[in-house]
Image (tube, helix red, strand yellow):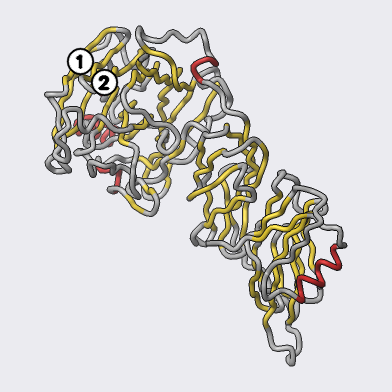
């Protein structure tokens, strides 16, 4: 647990307070009952040690009213500070002050070193750089969005927030807590990058678009119309690479299906003219010859039962594998496991997927049963009125008693709860009675359609193909 210390504004001058802080550093705090303000400042540590002649340590501080923090040192011959980054100069002790108006917080810094040796030249700072996915972002209160960061030397990223009352962060997932603005820091050693996060009041999604018609007996609870010019990261996150990675756990290579693409975190996604575009390309990334994208609402939005719908155009041709589907929201470190365990004892709902080779056929599938390889599935292929590269609407009506798949307003497949099961539960509706999240992706190749994959590789003439999504909407049954 981090040590945090808060100081209210006092009638004494800062210099006097600093004197007291040095005299009383053993107890780590200074107090005075004559407060003139309710503003407080919190600092990430009450004390720390660094090396002389270039040792560096990063501190974080936040004012209770969200105002800007100013940093200073009581003795700059011992230690200096810039924006929370403390650098040791010479052996000794100094107070690092984080202030907001008259309110302050102090960290007592002990700079270690042999004062009897000549001061060496300050070594060059490490050349490690951190790349962060967003320099700024906006999130509603209660909403979550994902930040991604990487260090140039591959070292682990540590996340911190400057103000917990505005936004918190865990492993890059930022949650809006209160209206205001704060900084989220990604650090590795002495390297740091930040994203300035603005938290706005939450909105009622069911009232924001009154022109959206809900299915009979349902009301709108979540949607994305893709009306902006970029992907809304408060609603979606990227899965990156050749396998899933979640809280340190990794999934099977090539996504468990011998897929050929590398999923990127933005280079294959665009939003324009009211549509999301996911583009698969022939280009080298990682150990793959193709790139594409896979976006998810995992950790940001999930539902138990509902009517999930998307209007889509998906590319045809050998090797194309577009999908609109759902997986269980994780309840542990694994990216897929929940109370029923792993796939497919915990279920999978494929609202739409297509073999591009077939042109005008869409598959609707339910996976269940036991953990692989004891998994089971039931599926239905539907021939559409036109190619999948034309606009079609795909939906699933999901209840505890049944799942029904609807394409272009017509029910094409229905399964009742006596047709599925989970080895992990005796509940009649298991495993489809837990929260699930939505995925949209365009895969290249894989075992879903071996004939299409073989023809795709043999032709070797692919350049790129795009899947378009007009909207994704989630409705809940009225009580």
Q: Which residue is mark 1?
A: 413
Q: Answer with left or right where residue 151 lies relative to residue 283.
A: right
Mark 2, Cα crowd under 10 Å, few <14 / some 14-19 / many 20+, is: some
- The residue shown at (20%, 15%) is 413
Residue 295, above or below 52: above
Q: Which residue is mark 2?
A: 399
- The residue shown at (31%, 36%) is 328
Q: Is residue 356 visible?
A: no
Residue 125, above or below 386: below
Q: Answer with left or right where residue 96 lies relative to residue 166.
A: right
Q: Answer with left or right where residue 77 lies relative to residue 345.
A: right
Secondary structure of the residue carrying tag 1 is: strand
Q: Answer with left or right where residue 293 lies relative to residue 319.
A: right
Give the CA separation, mark 2 to mark 1.
14 Å
CB atoms at circles 2 and 1 under 8 Å apart?
no
- The residue shown at (29%, 17%) is 397
Near-viewer residue (474 or 126): 474
Q: Position of residue 424 (x, y in %)?
A: 17, 41
Q: Position of residue 400 (x, y in %)?
A: 24, 23
Q: Nearer the viewer, mark 2 or mark 1?
A: 2
Residue at far front of view: 33
Near-viewer residue (312 or 181): 181
Mark 1, Cα crowd under 10 Å, few <14 / some 14-19 / many 20+, is: some
Point out the image quarter for the C terminus: top left
Q: Position of residue 200 (x, y in %)?
A: 63, 31
Quarter residue 17 falls in: bottom right
- The residue shown at (57%, 39%) is 177
Secondary structure of the residue carrying tag 2 is: loop
Residue 449, above or below 175: above
């Amino acid at each position: 647990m981090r040590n945090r210390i808060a100081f209210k504004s006092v009638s004494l001058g800062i210099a006097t307070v600093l004197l007291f802080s040095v005299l009383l550093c053993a107890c780590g705090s200074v107090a005075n009952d004559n407060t003139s303000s309710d503003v407080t400042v919190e600092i990430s540590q009450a004390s720390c040690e660094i090396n002389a002649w270039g040792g560096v340590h990063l501190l974080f501080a936040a004012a209770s009213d969200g105002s800007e923090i100013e940093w200073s040192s009581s003795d700059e011959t011992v230690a200096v500070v810039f924006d929370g980054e403390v650098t040791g100069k010479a052996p000794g002790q100094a107070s690092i002050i984080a202030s907001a108006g008259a309110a302050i917080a102090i960290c007592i810094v002990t700079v270690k070193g042999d004062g009897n040796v000549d001061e060496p030249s300050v070594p060059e700072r490490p050349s490690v750089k951190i790349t962060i996915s967003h320099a700024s972002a906006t999130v509603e209160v209660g909403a979550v969005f994902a930040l991604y960061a990487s260090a140039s030397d591959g070292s682990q990223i540590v996340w911190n927030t400057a103000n917990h009352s505005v936004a918190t962060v865990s492993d890059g997932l930022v949650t809006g807590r209160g209206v205001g603005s704060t900084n989220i820091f990604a650090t590795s050693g002495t390297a740091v990058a930040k994203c300035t996060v603005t938290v706005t009041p939450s909105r009622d999604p069911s009232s924001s678009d009154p022109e959206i018609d809900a299915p009979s007996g349902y009301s709108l609870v979540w949607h994305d119309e893709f009306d902006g010019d970029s992907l809304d990261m408060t609603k979606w996150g990227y899965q990156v690479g050749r396998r899933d990675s979640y809280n340190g756990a990794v999934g099977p290579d090539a996504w468990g299906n011998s897929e050929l693409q590398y999923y990127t975190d933005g280079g294959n996604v665009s939003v324009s003219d009211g549509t999301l575009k996911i583009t698969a390309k022939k280009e080298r990334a990682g150990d793959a010859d193709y790139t594409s994208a896979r976006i998810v609402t995992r950790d940001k939005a999930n539902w138990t039962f509902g009517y999930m719908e998307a209007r889509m155009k998906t590319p045809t041709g050998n090797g194309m594998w577009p999908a609109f589907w759902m997986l269980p929201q994780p309840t542990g470190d694994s990216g897929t496991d929940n109370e029923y365990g792993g796939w497919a004892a915990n279920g999978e709902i494929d609202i739409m997927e297509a073999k591009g080779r077939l042109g005008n056929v869409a598959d609707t599938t339910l996976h269940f049963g036991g953990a692989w390889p004891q998994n089971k599935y039931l599926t239905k292929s539907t021939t559409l009125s036109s190619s999948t590269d034309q606009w079609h609407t795909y939906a699933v009506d999901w209840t505890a008693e049944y799942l029904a798949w609807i394409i272009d307003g017509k029910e094409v497949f229905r399964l009742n709860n006596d047709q599925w099961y989970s080895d992990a539960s005796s509940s009649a509706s298991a495993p489809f009675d837990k929260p699930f999240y939505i995925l949209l992706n365009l895969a290249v190749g894989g075992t879903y359609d071996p004939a299409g994959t073989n023809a795709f590789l043999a032709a070797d003439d692919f350049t790129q193909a795009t899947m378009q999504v007009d909207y994704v909407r989630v409705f809940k049954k009225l009580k």
